[in-house]
Image: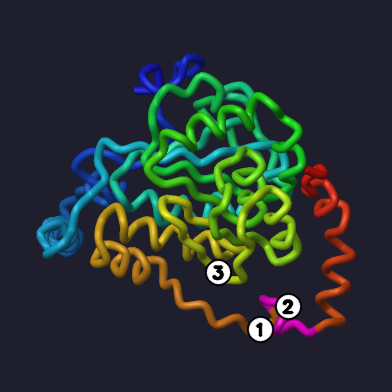
Amino acid sequence: MNDELNDTAETAALPGHTAGNDPTGSTLFSVVGDDPAKQDAIDRSIAAHHTLAARPGMRFATGKTILIVLHPGFELLDVVGPFHFLAATGADVHFVTTGSADEAVLSSSGVALVPALALHGMRVAPEVLLVPGGDTGILLRDARAMADLRRLGDQATYVTSVCSGSIALAAAGLLEGRRATSHWSVRHLLAGYGAVEVNERVVEDGNRLTAAGVTAGMDLAIKLVSYLCGDEMARFAVLGAEYAPEPPIDTGTPEKAGPALTDLSRDFLAPLVEELRAPAR
């Protein structure tokens, strides 16, 4: 499989990716005992899988490829939040590194992931290309990775980003003249790269879908599930994840947080923001 995708990869697809006849990736069916209650539960689950697959408008993205780009300093939730939902589509979901395959990529929170595939040399035209945020300045300084983003973005069915990942898409020339969003602290920088800044949680312009900061990546992924598999599958995935945000402290936007807290946060993030400012045109 990976040899068909990438010049450098030799190992199997990432653990946890989903494909084939069990698009849920479930391990339930591998546990069969002689307990009648457990067997009944397994039988009900199998029947539910078939019922779900037979519902009107339901389809799976089997055989299609989703690439989630990992660069040094990526924001972890930008990646694992969307991955949770996209794994339900039945597509082959891969993490791809801007470095060398099978080498750990450290996130901004210190958690490392080890992608089996490298962005450079990727030969497949992805159904979805997703670029997370984080320390995006590192990505902007990687000329080879930026060229690869442009190449794969030109081939992808959906070109997407979470948080400051949209700055990378814009810098790669993939958002020229397009409406887009980003984390509130860097959204104003989009115009410097030729994009049109929009203050919305998820912005769609043609096949370009950009999400605001961090948690908005899950909203983006839910929209992608609906496009790939239909609204019924998206509703099912949202229920399974119990995605019903009710933050106990509701300061998730500058408008809700107020000027004092927003200014403090802006100063806190200032070095990261300056790294993303476009050179004068």
Q: Which residue is mark 2?
A: 254
* In this rendering, position of residue 36 left or right of residue 273: left
Q: Which residue is mark 1?
A: 250
Q: Position of residue 136 (x, y in %)?
A: 72, 45
Q: Position of residue 206 (x, y in %)?
A: 42, 54
Q: Quadrant of the C terminus?
A: top right
What is the CA distance from the residue labelled 2 to the residue labelled 3?
13 Å
Q: Amino acid at mark 2?
A: Pro
Residue 40, by quadrant, is bottom left
Query: Where 117 falls versus 55 (above or below)?
Result: above
Going from N to C along the chain, the mark reached first, 1 or 3, is 3
Q: Position of residue 222 (x, y in %)?
A: 40, 62
Q: Give the magenta range.
A: 252-258
Q: Position of residue 82 (x, y in %)?
A: 48, 54
Q: Is there a contact, CB below 8 Å, between mark 2 and mark 3?
A: no
Q: Quadrant of the N terminus?
A: top left
Q: Amino acid at mark 1?
A: Asp
Q: Is there a contact, CB below 8 Å, between mark 1 and mark 3?
A: no
Q: Residues within 10 Å of mark 1 (few under 14, many from 20)?
A: few
Q: Which residue is mark 3?
A: 201
* In this rendering, position of residue 163 left or right of residue 185: left
Residue at point 68% right, 55% down? 190
Spot the residue most to the front. Answer: 281
